[in-house]
Amino acid sequence: MSGSGGYEYSYADQERSRRAALRGELAALDARCTAVRAVLRRLGAGREAPREVGAPSADAGSGELQALVDRARALVEEAERKAIELQTDRLLSRVASRGDERRTRRRAPGRAAGGTADRAGAMFVDADPDHARRSALERAEQVLAREGGRCDPEHLDRIDEVLAEIRAARTAEAARLGLARLESEVIASVKARADRAEAAVTHARLSARTDDLPAEQRRVLRAQLDAAHRSGDRAAVAAVGARIEEAVAAHEAEQVPQRVAAAATAALKAIGCDVGDEFTAVLAHDGQAVAALGTAWSEAYGTDRYWLLVRHDQKSRRISTAVVRNPDAPADAAADVEAQRMFCARRDEVRAGLGAADVTVQGEAWIAPGQPVPNAPTGPVRRAKPASGKQTERRRRTNTVAEPRARERELPS
């Protein structure tokens, strides 16, 4: 154990990741809500249309976002079920009335429209026009009961036209051709609607991914995304999506030093270190900063005798610490060892504090107490301004000149 050593870490902001995922899900649900609202209005059921998905506040946490997602999902799924039911009934009502023949309003079991079973069922055993027409209409009814609710509302008029052709068929061949055309129209319509829904959800999710980017970068990428989405070119959307993911990854990487520095600040403050108002900014910017060891050490060894040098190697993802002595304080080997031991006794608390802020310690390396405590560096390692209390002349010193290499070698690494 020693006050000299460090933590190798990995960083992943779990809460931020959860928030980003939930905002993307909320955006996707909003896109689905917009689509189903349009369907219901087209079907003359505007009163059944769901209200818009609520927009979360900018600082909403994952708990609040999850609640919004759950409510929105229930709302949208219920509206989608209603739209399917209404559209299915609307299409079935267009099938010609055939005397006392019953119309199937529930989805029949079997394969999707256009499958082998459906095509085989459409075969007619004789060339009687009336029988062929009835058989075609029965099969059309089954197809629409199963797939009609998922058709594109823009295609309903075309489906009506095909049904009219079947009803008017004067030969068995005309009835068979009408049924084949109906199956083809339904397959194409279902696919068109699914493709449009997928494109809208993709657009919404990617747009939400830009939420945390700087304003100008967000504006440019969203404009590119909107243009690609309007073009209907999937490759163009994918290309913009890749640029968005790259931008998000780069932005996140830029934030890591500040977030890790903030985590170190909180962990040291929790064990009584006087990290000062500027400690986080200094550590994030310079990669190293000095803090006072706090009240416990001051009472044991006098005010401002020992400080803590903290270094953050961003490339190797390592936070190192070393107990250092105020250059104006006299050397005392016994006091040096005890100061190291006092800091070392809180080492596990520092690790736990880092972990609580998503800085996960992967490994540690420490030098046993007893090594001479070096003087605090006089170069670019800056002491943050104390959070409170009267500043001494020593505490006001902030050096910005280059630290001599010899001094750097003198400190533990």
Image (cartoon, rainbow, N blue to C red):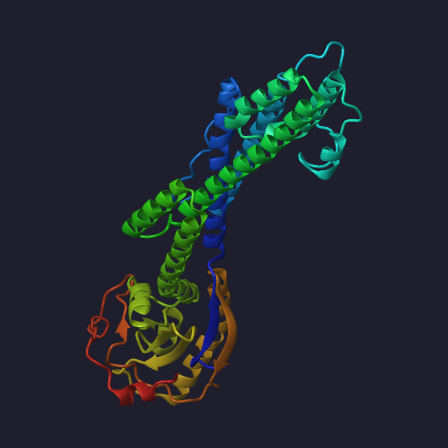
Q: Position of residue 310 (x, y in %)?
A: 36, 74
Name the residue: 51% across, 44% down. 63
Who is closer to the viewer here, 345 or 288? 288
Q: Position of residue 113 (x, y in %)?
A: 67, 34
Who is closer to the viewer here, 410 or 318? 318
Name the residue: 39% across, 59% down. 246
Above or below — where is 281 with respect to 337? above
Q: Position of residue 345 (x, y in %)?
A: 49, 75
* Left or right of residue 328: residue 22: right
Residue 377 visible in the displayed image: yes
Who is closer to the viewer here, 221 or 1? 221
Please identify the quadrant where the C terminus is shown. Answer: bottom left
Residue 50 visible in the displayed image: no
Q: Position of residue 174 (x, y in %)?
A: 66, 23
Instruction: Specify the quadrant of the image occupied by residue 162.
Output: top right
Name the residue: 36% across, 69% down. 294
Above or below — where is 116 with respect to 351? above
Who is closer to the viewer here, 373 or 29? 29
Q: Count all numbered tags in the image, as a single digit.
A: 0
User: In this view, which residue lies farthest toward the top?
Assistant: 99
* Left or right of residue 231: residue 33: right
Above or below — where is 308 with respect to 174? below
User: In this view, which residue lies farthest toward the right?
Assistant: 125
* Left or right of residue 14: residue 289: left
Above or below — where is 288 with respect to 369? above
